[in-house]
Image (cartoon, grey):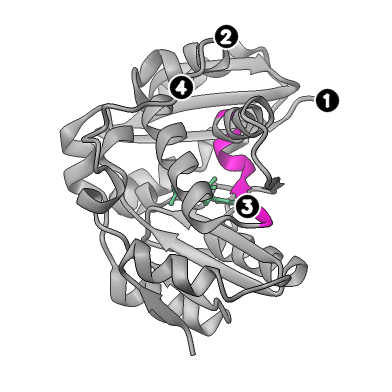
Amino acid sequence: MMNIVTEIETWRVIRGQFGQRTVGLVHTMGNLHAGHMSLCQRSKQENDLTVAAIFINPTQFNQASDFEKYPRTLEQDRLLLESHGVDYLLLFGADKLYPDHFQVQITETEISKVLEGEYRPGHFTGMLTIVLKFLNIVQPTRSYYGEKDFQQLLLIRKMAQALFLPVEIIGCPTVRADDEVALSSRNNRLTPEQREMARHFPRLLQSGLETSQIAEKLKALGFKVDYIADLWQRRLGAVWLDDVRLIDNIPNN
Ligand code: AMP
């Protein structure tokens, strides 16, 4: 049985009873898929207890419409987590997580300025702030993040080091569909034609062409391109199909 905890104070009491048992955390915004589940599976392999959290964090959305349209599928998510043997599901409200009304913020000043940070101002400050809150509340031994959001993973690692957080930050490989498109909750908002078109994005990232050539080819296919760039030994990109934004990255050898 998976236990659902909706109050932070209740969780603190439960956490206090774990003793020496190791705890793995997977925090997500819900609409769960095999990518999220790979994080849960890794956590289950490496820890005595696995805790999942679902919270659609309003402070990391730089567009109100993106927040409003974000898919909310709580019952489906609950069943998926339970069937994967997750021990606890945390569902805390925004009013409980932001008693300060977001007046206290965590900002990184270098990595967070480029790529995603340039195109989504404020996104990483909202993300780092909520991640630190969950790390402090849950007090996991290890916390799991997808390489799909590579810049996010770098920033969380950097925050954990800079603030001496007593947690191990674990990066997990990107889970892809059969046509190589990275699984993402936002894929659900693509029309069937757009979903078909989306496969060109990972295919071109993996093509070995110059970044500028990749951007040109994507534009010719009808994508809007925010960036295609080589950084941190990765090749990273962000594109739009109509009003749906997709990001991806691959190792750059
Ligand atoms: P999200 O709910 O989109 O905020 O994602 C929650 C966590 O799942 C983050 O650490 C993501 O990087 C990770 N994640 C999302 N999609 C994938 C994927 N396709 N493969 C691996 N991890 C993923």
Tell me the kind of residue under disc 2: Ser
Q: Mark 2 and mark 3: span between their CA atoms?
A: 36 Å
Q: Mark 3 and mark 1: span between their CA atoms?
A: 27 Å
Tell me the kind of residue under disc 4: Glu
* Residue at the right extreme, as displayed: 253
Circles 2 and 3: CB distance less than 8 Å? no
Residue bearing the label numbered 3: 143
The magenta segment: 141-151
Q: Mark 1 and mark 2: span between their CA atoms?
A: 18 Å
Q: Residues within 10 Å of mark 4 (few under 14, many from 20)?
A: many
**Residue 6 place in picture, x, y as percent:** 31, 69
Q: Mark 4 and mark 1: span between their CA atoms?
A: 22 Å
Please name whichever residue, 117 or 7, is drawn nearer the observer in this view of the structure: 7
Q: Is residue 174 above or below residue 218?
A: below
Name the secondary structure under disc 3.
strand
Mark 1 or mark 2: which comes first in sequence?
2
Q: Mark 3 and mark 4: span between their CA atoms?
A: 22 Å
Which of discs 2 and 4 lies nearer the camera? The answer is 4
Which of discs 2 and 3 lies nearer the camera? The answer is 3
Name the secondary structure under disc 1.
loop
Residue positioned 20% across, 47% down in the render: 69
Residue bearing the label numbered 1: 253
Q: Which mark is residue 212?
A: 2
Which of discs 1 and 2 lies nearer the camera? The answer is 1
Please name whichever residue, 45 or 210, is drawn nearer the observer in this view of the structure: 45
Name the secondary structure under disc 2.
helix
68 left or right of 136? left
Q: Quadrant of the C terminus?
A: top right
Residue bearing the label numbered 4: 116
Q: Is residue 220 above or below residue 207?
A: above
Q: Residues within 10 Å of mark 3 (few under 14, many from 20)?
A: many
